[in-house]
Structure formats: C-alpha cells, structure tokens
Amino acid sequence: MTFLHGIGRLTSSPGLRRGVSRIWHHRPALAVLERYISIGILREDYCKWERRVPITPDHVKHLIDNYKGDKLTGIYVQPSQRIFPDSQYEKAGAIVTEDLSSADVLLGVKRVANEDDLIPDKTYMFFSHVIKGQPENMQLLKAILDKNIQLFDYEAIAEDIQDPTTGELKKKRLVAFGKYAGIAGMIDTLQCLGRRLLASGYSTPFLNCSSAYVYYDLDEAKRCVDKMGNRIEKDGLPMTLEPLVFAFTGNGNVTKGALEIFKLLPHKMITLEEAKSIKSTSGPHNCLYGLMVEQKDIVKKTDCQEESFDVKHYRANPSEYESIFASNVAPVCNVIVNGIYWDERYPRVLTKTEMTDLYKRGNKSLFAVGDISCDVNGSIEFLQHTTTIDKPFFSWNPATNEAVDDINEDGVAIMGVDILPTELSVESSKHFGDALLPLLKQLIIDGYSRDGQGYENLPPELANACIARGGSLTPNFEYIEALMKRPAMIHHGLKDHHILLRIEGHLFDSGLINQILDVIERLDCHFEIEECAVKPTVNGIAHKSVLMLRVFSEDDSNLGSVITKVDLLVNLIDSAEASIQHFDSRSQSSQSKGSSGQSKVSVLGEQEKRVLILGAGKVAGSCAEYLGRSKSTTVAVASMFEDEAMAVAKNASRGKAVTCDLSQPSDKLRRLIEEADIVVSLLPAPMHSMIAEECISLKTNLVTASYESDEMRALRSSAEDAGVAILNEVGLDPGMDHMSAMKIIDSVHGRGGEITSFSSVCGGLPAPEAANNPLLYKFSWSPMGVIRASQNDATYRRDGEVVQVNGADLLASSEPFYAWQSLNLECLPNRDSLIYGEKYGIQSAKTIFRGTIRYQGFSSLLHVFKNMGILDDRETGAATWHDAIENLQGDRGFHDLRSFILSCAGNNKELASRVYSCMLWLGLKIAPVSDPSSIVVSFCDLLEQHLQFEDGERDMVLMHHDIKASFDDGSAESHSCSMQLFGDDSMTAMSKTVGYTAAIGTKLILEGDIAKKGLLLPTTKDVYTPSLDLLHKEGIIFEEQVHEEYDEVGHVV
C-alpha cells in the first residue's frame, strides 16, 4: 500500500465523459492509525536548462529536523544538474541515490522525460501539462493510468488555497514561480538591447549585462545591474544615441518584476507626452526613461473622437476598438517590455504591418522587444516563435518580413524565452518550495495509512489537484478521457480558421460539455483546450466551471454550425446556467450569450474571484465599479431592495444583484458569504459585528469603511484563530486620513524623530458654486450619518491641555479653519482624538486633534435646530411640521415662534434670522411630517429632499494634516499635507474617496498583498503604501510640503 491509497474510494459515474464534479469522500478511521511517509525528489531531465527544484536543501532540512523518525522515514534525491548541488541535499540529511523505489511521494518540477521511468503504484507531483488535453502529453497520462500512479499537478492547486500559516482560503494558484519571469525577462532584455545597439555601432554598458541564468542568484544579478547603472549615470550613453525610452505594458506580476530591475538603473518615469517631447533632446543621456503604457494609450473606440476611455466597456466589447499603439506609442519608444495579457478577441499591441509602415516612414527607433508574455503571433505579432535560453534572441526585419537568428541593425531584436523563471533557479525554487512545503507538512502529518483503514485531513488544495488515482481519472478530470481518444491532433496556429469558445456554467453536472464535444466531433472539427477550470461541488454547493475551446476547420460552414448549435445547447440546458462567449477569427468579432438570452460578457486570463458587497447606498457604486474592472472578478451586490442592488451592480463589468435581508443572520446570507472570496460591508456600522461573526465562521475575509467598534474588537482573537482578515476603517475618514498621516509619521519615526503636534481635519462639502442654500451643505452620503456625527462627544489635546466637549455642545465648538484661504471654512472636533496617540504612536505629542470641516455658518444653524429639539429621536406628535414645531416650542414654554428661535439662538438676532429663513426654505411651516414616530428621521428626510445635488453640480472632499516633529539634533520640521477632490458627472468625490478606498483594501487582500490576519487597520506600511499608490492613479493625490523651523538667529530648531 503506497501513499494516499488508503483513502476512501472516490465516487464515480459510468460513461467516459460525464466528468461530474465531486468532493472527496472518506471512510472514517476505525482506530488511531500510524502514518508515515517517505519523499523522493526526481531528476529534472525534461529540459537541459531546467535547474529548478520543487524543494531546496533548506526545505529538506526543515522536514527532516521536524519529522524524521516520527512521521517521515526519509528523503531520497536522484542526482541531477540542479542549482543546488547534491552535496547540499546530503548535508541537509537526504539520501542521494538513483533508486527512488523506497519513496512514497515523488516530487519534480517538470514531467519525467521518459514514461518508462515512472514507478508503478507511486504518487507523483509535477507540472504534467495534461489538464488541457495537450496531445503531446497524452502518452504520459496513459502511462500514469496504466501504472496505477496517483498524480497531483501543481497547476491545478488553484482553488480554496489554504495559507500555510493562517489557514485562510484564497482563490489563486498556490504553487507557482511568482514574479521571476518578469525579473529574468528584464535582465535578458537589457542584454538584447546591448547587442542590438552594438549592431548599430554603439558600445554601451548594456553589453556587460549577461543573461539572468549566468548569475548564481538574484542578488548577484542586481549587483551587476547596479554597476551598469553607475556607469550610465557617471559616463552617460553615447553622444549620438537618442534618449532611450522603455515602454512597459501590463500591470501584473510580470511587469512588476520587470520594473524591479529597471528601477535599479538611473531612470525617470515619464508620461507619453513627456516621451514625445524628450526625443528632441541631445546626448549624452545619463539616465533611461520609463513609460507605463496604459490601456487608453494602446486602443481607442473605432470611429469615436472622444478622448475619454472606458476600460470596462473595452474589456466587455473589445471588437469595437482598434489599436493606436503604432501611431501613439511605438514612434517614441526604443524598447518594449511586454507583459500584457492578450487573446485574439483584443486588438494586437503592434502588428507586422504597422511595424513595416513605421520603417517605411523612416522611424526605426524600436531597437528591442522583451516579450515576457510570450504569445507567439500574439499581442506583438512579430514574435514568430519562442526562443531558448541558449539562443534567447532573434531579429525580425520589418522591411522584408524575415526573421534571422543573429542580431543585426536591419531589424528589431526580440527576446521570447518561454521558461524565464528557471534562469533565476535559486529564488524561483525557494519561492516555489515555500509554497509547497505547507502541503507536504500536512501530508507527512496526516497523509499516509499503512493498513488502509482510513484517511483523514486530505488538504482540499491537493484533493482538487489530483488528476489520476487507482488507474482512473478523478471525477474533476474525467473530461480528459475524451481528449485521449481523439485522433492525432493537427498542429494549428492562430492564422488557421477557427473559433474560440469560452463556456462558463455547471458544465459537467448538466452534461452540457459532453453534448458540446459531440457537436464538434460530428461536424468533423478539431479542437484544442485553452483553459479548463473545473470547480468541484463543496459542502453541497455546486460552483460553475470554465472551459475555453479553440475549434478549427477549413470549412467555414462547419464553424458556423458549431456556433449555432452550441448557442442552442446553452439556451436549452437550463440546469447548466451557462453563458458562452465566442470569437470568430474569420470576422474578427466576438459575441456573448447566456442561457437567459441576455448578454453575458466576461474576459479571460486571470484567476476567477468573487466579491460580495453588502449594502447598496451612496458609496457602493464606486466600490463595485473599481472591483468590477477586473476581467475575472464577479461582484455580487446584496440589498433588501432589488432596484437598489441592480443600480449598484451595473457598475461592475460582471456584476449581479441579489435581494437579501441583511438585518439579521439567515441561511441565504450565510450562503452568499460562503460563496464569496471576500465581503465588503457598506452597511450601517452597528451591523458590522454580526456580518463579521458570519465571515469568521465561514473563513471569509471582510472589509468595512467604518470605525472599529468595541463589538468588532471583541472578535480579534476569533478572527486570528480562523485565519481571517477583517480590515476596518478603509474609507475617507476613517481611512485615507490614517494612511496619509501614517506615511509622514512613520517617516519621522524612521529618522529618529518625535511627533510634537498632530492635527488632522476632513470634510465632504458641496463645491463652492453648489453651496447655494442656507445650510451651505448638500448630501453625498447619509443625512442621518451627518446628524449623528454632529452630536458625538469629542476629546482632544491642545498645547498639553486635554479638552473635552460634550456631544450636546459639539456644534457650538466650531472654529474658523484657514488651510484653504479661498474657502470660508470652519472646523469641529471629531470624536476622541486621544486614542490616535496610541494608534499612531504619538502619545507624547502636546497637540492631538482630529476635526470635521464645514462651511462657516453650518454648525451654528444646526446647533439652533438641536436646541429646538428637531434633532431629537422622539415622536413628532403631529402630522405637519407646523404643528410639530408648535409642540416643540410649547414643550419649552414659548408661545411665539420667533422668541422660541431667538432663545435657542442664544439671543443672537442675526443667527435667529438665518434660522428662520432656513426653516422657510426647507418648508418647515407647511410640509407634512414623513415619519410621525421620529422627528429627527423626518428632518433627515426633509434635508435629503432639499439638499440634493442638482444636475451639473459637484461635491468636494477636503483633507488636511499639520504635523510637527522634533529630532535629537535639535532640528524640527513642520509637515503640511492636503488633498482636495471634486466630483464629476459620473461620480461624487465622496463616493470615490470612500468606495475606491474600500475597494482598494479589498483588492490588496484578494491579491495577497495584505497577508496579515485578524483585525487590521490601514495604519501599517503594507496597507497604506500600496493603497496610496493606487489612489494616486485614480487622481486622489495628497500634496505634501515640509518646512524646517528656525530660531531667531537662523538655527534650525
């Protein structure tokens, strides 16, 4: 009995292609079982350049030190040409041997080169490349089945990923090689550029940059790039060489890795307009220029002269757009570093014809292309083939459309290596092994039963990644059997006539995929699988799977019939709940249909993510819009009211509306939370703790824009134990105030300084031209929220003295505020400022103040209304405001309205006159009461009715910090940080600042950039640094100024 063969049998169904998604079923153990396991590491012989390893000697040592003699019997290593020599494995405690027959689990990176080397009845883990039915690997899969081998594929360890430390479930590939393709690709591209410039007669420091594989590790490579940069900065590039502009496409890990290397060189990041202007400058140039190419720089809507660009519309309707890269970007760039996702639904970045036209017009500035994405004939059409590590470059001549292996001055030098991570084998292996190690630990601890009585705790990551077991394909991968039986495949290229089908739904349970394959076969078409994400049924809940097929035929009528018949199947088989998108290479168009008959468009290339937004209020739309930009994210919006949910959901490219009572726990609410990868609660703050409890129990991360309450803090240990991140206070205030302030505070502390004074204020207001009512205010968020905030107690410290303000007196405590001299502003203290002494680490500051900004006059008017009783939560005792006001004045012993108002205004006649005018303007003399049970609710309804923004009016958000610091050397600094943002026709400033900030926090957790668990605030660098960068990209910019302070004789104080 070998590893995992003691598992209770998988249920299966008859038929070759039923492919029903199931979970693993285990028989309970009859007794406490002894479990132990041995591991083997395979020789990497599939490619001579493959030097990566699945686990490093350090990983081996860790396993042996912790489990040898208890759960682990030994680790055996086949001799190989790895980056880590065999002696290091021996030193770590492994046995180096050709014979791995003693090992239960055999680990590799790539597949074995020879199927005969597979040992029967073993468990293997490697990249098998069989999931898409790749014809070249079907013989390997047949051998695996014939030899009763259990196969786990790293590529399939993708869903319900469990963090090895926290236990958090994530929807992303767990075991992969990270950003190292981008890093290695950039290093190779620099060498490619050096050789291309040499062919044109320029000797440059780029020639001293070797391919990434030459360096032992990344540190050594970076030192070389640093030296190269020092030479460029010191000596400059050749006098006659034009300024070198590097254009970067894409914004994923590939591009981030490339930029990590580029930014080691002397550089300046520039805009497209700046790139056009610097081309006329003369040398020698002592730096390089980096250009981040945005989507709007690559494409534009066909026959549309508008300058605005709607990314969401483009991703949903790519056939309506055309490429402008050739006319817009290519003429000014010298190097393209391509990291963009592309498939043929989208316009190419740069075609052969466009490049040829540039050459004909005399523009031969493009020296090199580093195509890290490596799509042959893809987004860069003249990447005619991939390259190898030993022959990494070729030249393509736009004038002759010929490609040659050597680099010459007659064309563009191209780097297209398709196994870049192996060039940085040390870091790639460490990164990979770090991800794999937690799974191996679980297998060692719980993974092997010698007597076959039972099996417990199979990690779900591995359960979903098991392709073969017991001589059969597992249910999730039974569809591959049909592909094994097809005739030998003809190799097709993208130029051949074909259609691309992307089908999402319950494809296997419903039998839809079987019927689709039958249609394709009956019409004598060939097909290849581009993508297959099979999502199993978990806890009785069936999740939709995704299949992308490329169908080829020389007969156009057959391809047309495939489209017609598959569309019909999608609409007929309701149980599949399927949607389909198809691209027809013959017409270069794409269409989408769903089983409901409505258009359902989705874009490919990223891991599917599911976000649940709870609440459909004023800021939910911006949150949905931001998160819904991702081509792979479904945004579900839940509200008690369907029309509100639909209005918000339509902002996301893949949005859907759900009606649900969110006021109390329910089975439906739990199901929504369970199906989501992360929840964004935009509900009223008192409801967050209930939502958080559900999220913790279901191990789903949570984001809110509200203050962290005592009830939420009580859940800290529960969240940590569950491995759940609950990120609170990610909005405007609280949220952006924390981030922008902590950036300054951490900078001061990092330089040994101390904060002596801290003041932070924020406010959402109408733009000056829209402040056209007596209250000088309009609502871009809940009126009740404004009223409640105006009656909170407040505490702050000023010049060492603690000041406490009772909530009843808060509105009377406003003071003028002068940070924006052109605006007539006032400021109110905001809640308990002193708690930020500890939160921000500034306990010793003599001044700690947080405030709310309004136009001058707002607070005094509202204070009078409070004194009159209009802000009380009590019954009105009347059906009209006239009668309600009479009741209020009678309760206070007044028989005359004017004297009542004057008394409530502190006998200030001018203020009393303003209040009376405001009451008339609001209709308080004649309007009916909307809610007789609450006078304050009725007043809020009246405010919302009269204080709305009209068409064409803008709101405005202001935020300002004044921070003073002192240092041990006696010096001092005064920091000023301001942000002013206006709304526009599409979105209010309040909605953007709150909704985008919450969405960015959500995005960072989803993508793993925020890894901590438990209760979190945006006061740490791992949160505020990327958040502020992403907000900056949305035009939300903080302007900072720093002033050194001097004493009377001119010394810094």
Image (tube, rainbow, N blue to C red):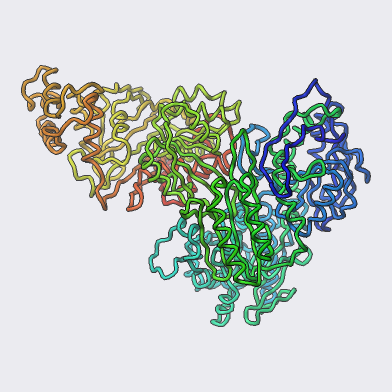
- Give residue 507's position: percent from left, percent from top: 61, 48
Left or right position of 163 against 698: right
For image coordinates 55% across by 58% down, the residue present is: 567
Relative to 837, say whether 480 is above or below. Answer: below
The one of 226 and 246 positioned closer to us in this rendering: 246
- Give residue 379's position: percent from left, percent from top: 60, 65
For image coordinates 66% across by 45% down, the residue present is: 173
The N terminus is located in which quarter? top right
The one of 563 and 245 positioned closer to us in this rendering: 563
Tell me if I can see residue 22 in this picture. Answer: yes
- Give residue 408's position: percent from left, percent from top: 70, 77
The C terminus is located in which quarter? top left
Relative to 415, say whether 897 is above or below. Answer: above
Tell me if I can see residue 971 in this picture. Answer: no
- Give residue 8's position: percent from left, percent from top: 77, 32
Q: How many marks can you see?
A: 0
Left or right position of 835 against 781: right
Relative to 951, say whether 809 is above or below. Answer: above
Left or right position of 80 against 479: right
Q: Quadrant of residue 224?
A: bottom right
- Which residue lies most toward the left here? 896
